[in-house]
Image: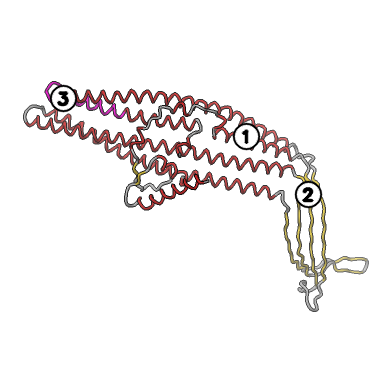
Amino acid sequence: MRTKIKQKVTVFAFLLLLGFSAGAQTVNITLKDALKYAIENNTEIRKARLEIIKGQLQTEEIRARALPQLNGKSSLTDQLIIPQLVVGNQIFKMGRQWTGDAGLSFSQQLFNQQVFTGLKAAKAGESFYNLSAELTEEDIIQQVSTAYYQVLVSREQLKTIEANIQSIGRIENTVANQFKNGLAKKIDLDRVHVNLTNVKTQRDQLANGIRQQENILKFYIGMPVDTQIEIPSAELNKISEDALSRYSNFKVEDLTRYRLLMKQEELLVYQKKAAIAEYFPTLSMTGNFARTSTSDRFDIIGGHNSSAVKYNASAIGLTLNIPIFDGFARRSRVKQADIQIQQIQQDLKNTKNSLSMAYNNANLELRNNISTINAQQENVKLAAEIYASTQNNYNNGLAPLTDLLNAETSMVESQNSYNKALLNYKLAEIQLMQSNGNIKTLLN
C-alpha cells in the first residue's frame, strides 16, 4: 500500500513539474517518467478502468434480480358512464363514478437457475475486465517504450549528422583555400559543397521526423503535444547482457493475453449454462396490498360529509413456471453457445502457439542484436581510424578528395548502423519482456 502511495506521489510531483515547466522550458523525461505518466493519463487505459467499474455495476444489476422487488402503485379513475346491470325489470349501477386506489406489490425469486448462473457469470465478467485493463496497460507500455527509443535513436542520428556537417564544413574550408592557391580544382570545391548541402537536407528531414516521433510519444502517454520534452541520451547505451537469462522463465499460461482468453472461455461456459437453465422451472413468491376508495363525488380522500367508501385488499401467493415447449429455441441457444466455446478453444490453441513463437523469435532477435552491436562497435572504431588515416593522406597530397569524402561517408554510415543496432536491441528487449509477461518491470 505504501509503495502505491509513493508511486502516486511521485507521479503527482512529476505532473506538477510538467504543469509549471511546459510553458517555460523543456521537460526532461526518462522512460520511467513517460511510462508512469501514460499509466495515469493514457485514454485507452482510462477507458479500460471505466470498463472495470461498468463490470462491477453489471454484477450489482444481476444481483438485484435475486433480491426482493417492491413496487408502489396508485390510480384515479373517473367513470364518465357507469356500467349498469339489468336484472329482470331492475337496473343496478355497477360501481361509482370516482375510484382511487393505492397499493404495494412484492415479489421474490425463490428458485431461478438463470439468475444464479448470471451471478456467477457477472463475477467472472469482473475478472475479465480487470485482465483486459491489465493487457491494455501492457500494450501501452510496449507502445510508449518503442516510441521512446525511436526518438532517442533518431536524436543520436541527428548528433551524428551534425558532427558530419561540421567535418564536411572543415573540408570545404580546406578545399576552398587550396582552390584560391591553385592547389585544387573548381570541381573539387563543387563536389564538397554538393555533399554538404545533401547532408544538411538529411539533417532537416531527420529533425522534422524527430518532432513527429515526439508528438507520437506524447500522444501515447497522454501528454499535451505542445509540451517540449528532452530525453537523456545516456539511457540508450544500457545493454543488458543477462537479458536472455533474466527472461528465460517463459510460461504461456501466465501471460495476460492468454489468461484473458481463458476467462472469455469461462464466460462462454456460463453463457451455455444460462441457456441450459432455461429448461429449469422457476418459483417465485408474490404478494400485494391495496386500499381502494370509491364515491359518487370527487371526495374519495374522505372528510366531513364524505360519501366515499373505503376498503382494503391483500393477497400472497406462489408462482411456478414450468417450460414445456418453445419450438426448440432453447436447444438452438445451447448449441450456439457450445459452438462459441469450440471456437474460442481454437483461439486458445492458436494464441498459445503464437505467444510461444513470439517469445522464441524475441530471444533469437535479442541474441542476434547483441552480436550486431558488438560488431558495429568495432566497425565504428575501424571507420574512424580509416577516416583519420585518409584525412592525413589527403592533407599530405597522398589521397584524392573522393577517398576522403568516401571515408567520411563510411564513418557516418557505421555510426548510424550502430545506432540502429541499439534501437533494434531495445525493441527486441521490449518484445522479449512483453512476450514473457515482464513488460511492467519497466515501471520499476
Disc 1 to disc 3: CB gap under 8 Å: no
Q: CA distance from mark 2 to mark 3?
A: 99 Å
Residue 265, numbered label: 1
Sequence-wise first label, 2 or 3: 2
Mark 1: few, some, or many residues within 10 Å (few <14, many ≥20)?
Answer: many
Give the residue pinned by disc 3: 392
Please name the residue that numbered disc 2 is placed on: 284
Which residue is farthest left?
181
Q: Is residue 381 above or below residue 161?
A: above
Q: Picture coordinates of residue 432 (x, y %)?
A: 46, 30
Q: Could you tell me if the residues under marks 2 and 3 are in contact, i.e. CB atoms within 8 Å? A: no
- Identify which amino acid the numbered label 1 is placed on: Glu
Counting residues from the N terminus, which is met first, the one under dot 1 or under dot 3? 1
Q: Amino acid at mark 3?
A: Asn
Marks counted in the figure total 3
Does residue 329 appear to the left or right of 223 in the view shown? right
* Neighbour tally class for label 2: few under 14, some 14-19, many 20 plus, Cα within 10 Å: some
Asked if marks 1 and 2 touch (Cβ < 8 Å), the reply is no
Eye-nearest disc, 2 or 3: 3
> In the rendered image of this protein, does residue 84 appear above or below residue 189?
below
- Comparing 173 with 364, the one in front is 364
Circle nearer the viewer, 1 or 3: 3
Of 433 and 262, which appears nearest the observer? 433
Q: Earlier in the sequence, mark 1 or mark 2?
A: 1
For numbered disc 3, what is the local secondary structure? helix
Measure the C-alpha gap from mark 1 to mark 2: 31 Å
Viewer-closest of 390 and 244: 244
Q: Which residues are magenta?
A: 394-416
